[in-house]
Image (cartoon, rainbow, N blue to C red):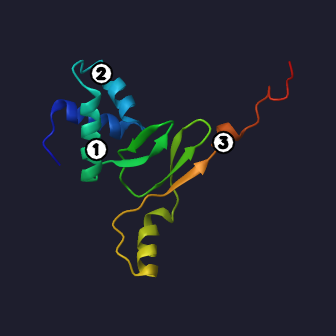
Amino acid sequence: MKKYSRKREAIFNALCSAKNHPSAEWVYETLKPRYPDLSLATVYRNIAEFVREGTAVRVGVVDGHERYDGDTQPHAHFICDSCGSIMDIEYPAVPALDQSVAQENQLEVQRYELTFRGRCGKCSQPRADAHIIN
């Protein structure tokens, strides 16, 4: 990994500490008050470098914005197609999935991404006012 500047370190820390799987725009808006000369291009460039280095991963596109995760340990994601929330999915078989696929198919798996999509529990709940007719 490159030597960090203060801004680069702040971008990395914001990415890793956020549990919302942030977009570059979110990281930029979060850090801009502390770093007034920070540009969105700098945030994008640094996040792209983190992804190339393997210290961050792309999760998927939600509402036209690529979202990222600073947690590079094997785990799956769930993206809600209704509200756009992204959740980490911990499942016992996920960490061993690459080994199983590699062994069964005689492959060398270097990394994998597993994403589930649908509606989260909050969006799946019927609304109390759904049957009111005006």
Q: Looking at the picture, which amino acid does disc 2 mark?
A: Lys
Q: Looking at the picture, which amino acid does disc 1 mark?
A: Ala
Q: Position of residue 72 (x, y in %)?
A: 35, 52
Instruction: Please tell me which residue lies in front, 96 or 133.
Output: 133
Task: Say whether residue 21 is visible.
Answer: no
Q: Which residue is mark 3?
A: 121
Q: Nearer the viewer, mark 3 or mark 2?
A: 2
In the rendered structure, which disc, 2 or 1, sits on the residue that comes first in sequence?
2
Q: Residues within 10 Å of mark 3 (few under 14, many from 20)?
A: few
Q: Which residue is mark 2?
A: 32
Q: Kindly indicate whether the residue at mark 1 contacts the one at mark 2 (C-beta within 8 angstroms).
A: no
Q: Nearer the viewer, mark 2 or mark 1?
A: 1
For the C terminus, the quadrant is top right
Q: Position of residue 23 (x, y in %)?
A: 40, 36
Q: Which residue is mark 1?
A: 48
Cα distance, mark 1 to mark 3? 32 Å
Q: Who's the residue at 54% across and 49% down the image?
A: 78
Q: Position of residue 56 (x, y in %)?
A: 32, 48
- In what element is the residue under mark 2? loop
Q: Looking at the picture, which amino acid does disc 3 mark?
A: Gly
In the rendered structure, which disc, 3 or 2, sits on the residue that comes first in sequence?
2
Cα distance, mark 2 to mark 1? 19 Å
Q: Who's the residue at 33% across and 27% down the image?
A: 28
In the rendered structure, which disc, 1 or 3, sits on the residue that comes first in sequence?
1
Q: For this view, does 42 lie left or right of residue 125?
A: left
- In what element is the residue under mark 1? helix
Q: Residues within 10 Å of mark 1 (few under 14, many from 20)?
A: some
Q: Residues within 10 Å of mark 2 (few under 14, many from 20)?
A: some
Q: Who's the residue at 16% across and 38% down the image?
A: 4
Instruction: Please tell me which residue lies in front, 117 or 124.
Output: 117
Q: Kindly indicate whether the residue at mark 3 contacts the one at mark 1 (C-beta within 8 angstroms).
A: no
